[in-house]
Amino acid sequence: MIRVRILVPVRNKKTKMAAVTEYIKESYIELTQKVTWPTWRELQNSAVVVLIAAIIIAMIIFGMDKIIFLY
C-alpha cells in the first residue's frame, strides 16, 4: 500500500486591515533602509541625459514629420 501525504498550506488568519498595515510597514522599511537612493549629483546627471535624449528624439520625429508632409 502506498501512502500519499498532501500538504496544505496554512493560511494566516489575519484580517484584511492587519495585512494592509503589515504591507505598509514593510514598504516603509524597504524604502528607508534597503533602497539605495542616488545622490543629488547623480540625479542631476540622469535628468540631463533624459532631457538630451528627449530633445534628440523630438528632433528626429519633427524631421520625419516634415519629410512626410512635403510629399
Image: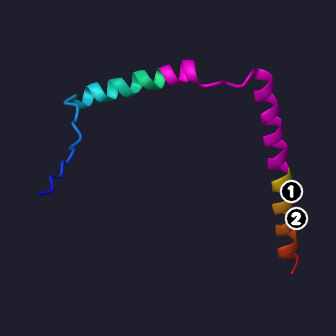
**Camera-side residue: 45 or 37?**
37
Rendered-image quadrant of the N terminus: bottom left
Which three-letter amino acid code belongs to the residue tagged 1? Answer: Met
Which three-letter amino acid code belongs to the residue tagged 2? Answer: Gly
From this view, report whether residue 25 is shown above or below residue 68.
above
Q: Please provide percent x and percent y for residue 25.
A: 41, 21
Membership of 45 in magenta stretch:
yes
Q: Which residue is drawn at the image coordinates 66% and 24% (left, top)? A: 37
Q: Which residue is mark 1?
A: 59
**Camera-side residue: 39 or 14?**
14
From this view, report whether residue 54 is shown above or below residue 14.
below
Q: Are marks 1 and 2 in contact (CB under 8 Å)?
A: yes
Q: Is residue 21 left or right of residue 62?
A: left
Q: Which residue is mark 2?
A: 63
Instruction: Report helix, strand or loop for mark 1.
Output: helix
Q: Please provide percent x and percent y for residue 35.
A: 60, 25
